[in-house]
Image (cartoon, rainbow, N blue to C red):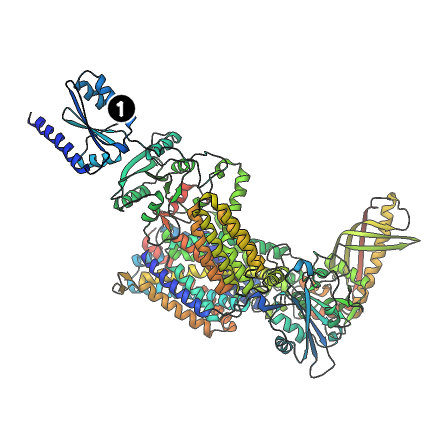
Amino acid sequence: MSVICTGRRLMAIIVSLSLILQSGCGFKDIDKRVFVLSIGVDHTDNEERPYKVILKLAIPTGSLRESGTEFTYLTKESESIASAIRLLKTHADKELDFGHAKVIVFGEDLLHHDLTEIADFFVRRRDIQRVSWVAVGSPNAEGVLKTQPSSEKAGSALFNLFDQNGVESAYIVSTYLFDFRRRMIETGFDPILPVLSSSNDKKKIVVNSSILFAKNKHPFKLSPRETKFYNLLANNTQKLDLIVNRDDLIYTIAVDTAKTKYKLVTNTKNKPGIKLDVSVKGIIEESNKQMDPSQLSTYSKYASEMAKKEITELLKKLQEYDADPIGFGLRYKATRLHTRDTFKEWEELYPELAFDVNVNVSIMSTGIIE
Amino acid sequence: MRSFTNKISTSHETLEWLFEELKSTSDLVNKPLHVGEKHVELLYIKTVVDGEQLQQLVIKPFFELESLEHVEAYLNSLPNLQENQPREQMLLELTKGSVVVEVRDQLLLLDIKKSNTEAVLETSIEPTIQGPQYSLSEDIATNINIIRQRYHKPSLTVEMMELGENTHQSLAIIYDEELVISDVLENIKKKLSALNPPIIQSTTELNRLLNDKKRSLMPIMMMTERTDRVVFNLAGGKVVLLLDGSHTTVIAPVVFFDFMTSMDDIYGSYWITRFLKLLRYFGLFACLTLPGIYVAATSYNPEVFRVELALSIAGSRIGVPYPSFVEVLFMLVFMELLTEASIRLPKAVTGAATTVGGLILGQAATEAALASNIMIIIVGAVAISTFVIPINEMSFGIRVVRLILLVFASFAGLAGLVFGLIGFLMYLTQLNSFGEPYFKIYLQSKRAETEKTSS
Amino acid sequence: MNRYFIYLVFVNMVANVVASVPKILISQRSEGALLSMIISYILGLVFCYLCARFFNLFPGEGLPDLTKKYMPRWFSFVILFVIAVTWYIAGLITLVTFSFLLKRFLTPDMPLSWITITFLLFLTYGILLNSKSVLYTVEFVLICSLPFVFIITIKAYTSHELNWDFIGESLMYIHNPPSFTAISASAYLLLGGFNLIIFNRLFKKKQQINWKNMLFIALIGGTALVTTYFIPIGMLGFDAVGDVVYPWITTSDSLRLEFFIVERVIYIFLLLYLAISFLSVLIHWHVTLELLKSIIWFKKFQLKKRNLTPYLFLSFFWVASLIAVSYLTEYHLIQYSSYFLNFLLCSFVVMFSLFLFIKRRAKV
């Protein structure tokens, strides 16, 4: 016991000494830091300094509740993002802290160039969250970052759009940084990013389309409608609406639950194909005529046919473009015992695939009126 | 015949000796009673003897009874009679309130103590909602009486001993013979007999005196004033020490978790008490770590918590001139001062002190930008959580540990805080209370646990 | 079975993440990691069972006590010394890896040596405690941290972002022949029971080792192994996970607890593993110290009636760790850990022949 006693006393002395000596290392008060909330990267046409980095910084204010958060921006053009940030450090009187950078926006122009280096920067740095959202800014990142929606408060800067706790919408694709990276690297699984477009008066941000860039191909934009169906297929999105237009009757279905399953069929003698089952449950939200509850199954059928058409079109489009954001290729690799040629086989197979889409919409109710 | 004469001389000599010893005491009474053939001599100290009882028990019967033989027989039959004792002991008993009666050349020692401390006090240190509202008195006989009243079992043993070179306080060791862990009992007795402090005033002092380590932070005995806790612990096989003149008892051996139980935990219904327990442990955790977390979160890892929180801390720290740990230390020290002040002050002033200290200082400190708003919330939360710990001594210990953790957090952030917590844990696990492990999780029944690790 | 034994096994299972096990396994993902994991799982369980059975024959006696009784002195010295060094290195790997992790993720501005020294300070206090206190500490920390480990695991499995197709892809490599490196890396998970070589001193009563206990260990071990390997692949992608230096840290950063006080799992994870890897080093080095004390004891080496031999060993511990921390790079660390794990598995042949020999001699 006494051995421990001296040990402790000795230790206490060493601890206190070492602590006094080392003080100052890493100790930096919160008011000496400034938080970067979003990072934007644009492409300049300048060959020497191709990247323009925009940082959106939050300025803390004494009474957060009354005045909300104020923002300030730092911009710099440089040959690499890292050097731009090094230079930007000299523009702020406080240490830049990237720990809360939750949104990374790439300018649309940037997508036409090689993204590898940029993505690498964000992935390599330890202080950038792997769960930050990646998006594309249209027409450029700077415009998007500098937009301040009037509802933006308390540093929420764009987060709520992507966080499914905030806005729930089927038109928004949210892609985390780590998801973006794995899609960039993996074969048979292509990156897709949401497009943020700012209105001209810089008061509004719209996110309802998405952009897809298959490996080694030009980026390809999905319309809001296509984005919606992509979300249905890939993410089983639930806050979805289906608009059916048939013989003068127009009605909208609000989807409660949606489930997509698909299977690659390659062993049959027929043409290889993908069998895709989508089951959707929902209620009618809006209609231009009175709805007849006994006809619910008919309404469901119409909706199914409509959705089937849309989905098949989307899939065909993706196939034509040789893009694979849903990960059919990955599924192929995951269900075939690995050989050296697995992926090559798939690459040959994909353009040939036939889509067998089955949509089963079941409308549960006509809402609280008929 | 010879022995008889011898005895005469002895008894008389003893009386003389006693008289000589106490001569300088002004309240010493040496009163001969004399009527007819009957002659008795009384020697006592007036201020510690209950005069009325003396009158009833000794003086009145003396005049009523026929002969001296009757008187002697009568006195010998009194329950207050103490067995023959050496004269030094008699001297000591006299100071405690005994009366020496010389009757027929024989010295009888009668215990006719007057005690003004018999009143049973209300619980003031550990109040509970349910359970007995009265605690113990400051008189040992009353206390033993109270405990015996609540624990009717023949195996309840009360051993008496004396402590204190100058004060000769009586100390009772109370335990249930059937349940007590004999090693622990031996250990305690051995340590008690080795003790020889000049004065001992409070049972809590024993806590320090019986500890092997000179410098210790955590109490290894539990001080309590609650009789239900005493009984509960007796039934759990623990040893209770009672000191005359102190209205608290100490209980040994204890484990850390004993300090976190309130007696209400036994009285309430299952889920309520579970909830209260959980709350208490949460309070313990909060008051240990909150200051450290604040420093770590503001100065090392602001990215750990949500961005809104980071911004609002940053906002409320605008204009605060000192680094976060100075700010925390400053507020904590003032909080400790406030707590100390409200203990020491007379009850009437306490309210004013807390108002001035708590409200005005807190408000002014934020207004003057000496501390951030969030800091004030944290200090308040910490103070309140500290008061949740039911046993006072533990909460004193925790207050010190909190500062140590704060130091670690100030120098290594969250990592330092975790290291500090583990260090504190290791400190607790190596402690033992009279041979029983101090910090150990009891998952199985107590017997199984003690057997398992007996090594 | 004594619950303290199960804790010893647990610590290794959980702490493997900071012992480069996932990194090594993942680097072998297309070279037979899967089959190796299955093999080492069975092997590890058998080892664990045999070890528990063996020490159950000698309640209250550690390995040093046994070798002293049944072996020639010099042989006992050599073998215990080698075991002590092995255990030391096992702790050292965890220590260095975690120092790197802290430097990289939690306190990037603090010098590496300071981080290590902080670690060492607390470790020094810890390993000097008696074995009983060490076990109590282990128990309490585990009880506090296992719920969080559990929550993170559940969160990872139920995460929407966990792509099962990547896991499916990795399963498609099942036909690759197993590799020794992968076997030895994954066997590490189940070797925690061997800390009994010292801690058996505390288990004075004969334990009952029945199939229920073993099933429990097997279940937990299986879950740990599967989680260790598949979750990073499922989160980060089968190909992309290959160039991640700390697969599990990055994985934990890919998880979000939307409704918790701390939103980013990585910080909960780091603090949790700080505690768990501390335990791991604590246990390993405590065993080392006790082993060394049993073979080398300088009676005269005293100061104020206190024997300084343990402090001598500790100073060696300090020097070696500080040197290791300053000279190793992340890459070398993983490489050496892999060599060490290979060696560890081989050394168990010696360990078991030792057990057999002692058993024969003791005739029990």
| Extreme-top residue of the structure | B66
Against A74, residue C190 (above or below) is: above
Q: Nearer the viewer, residue A320 or A258?
A: A258
Q: Nearer the viewer, residue C176 or A17?
A: A17
* Pointer 1 chain: B
| Extreme-right residue of the structure | A248
Per the image, the residue denoted by label 1 is B55
Left or right position of B40 against A225: left
Left or right position of C192 against B51: right
Q: Quadrant of residue B271?
A: top right
| Extreme-left residue of the structure | B2
Q: Quadrant of the N terminus of chain B?
A: top left
Q: Position of residue B19 (x, y in %)?
A: 17, 34
In what element is the residue under mark 1?
A: helix
Q: Nearer the viewer, residue B326 or C346?
A: B326
Which amino acid type is marked by label 1?
A: Gln
Q: Position of residue B23 (x, y in %)?
A: 18, 37
Q: Position of residue C177 (x, y in %)?
A: 56, 66
Report whether residue C272 is seen: no
Disc 1 crowd, CA 10 A, few/some/many (<14, 14-19, 20+): few
Report whether residue B188 is seen: yes
Q: Position of residue C243 (x, y in %)?
A: 59, 71
Q: Nearer the viewer, residue A64 or A74?
A: A64
Label tally? 1
Left or right position of C9 against C159: left
Against A247, residue A144 (above or below) is: below
| Extreme-bottom residue of the structure | A48
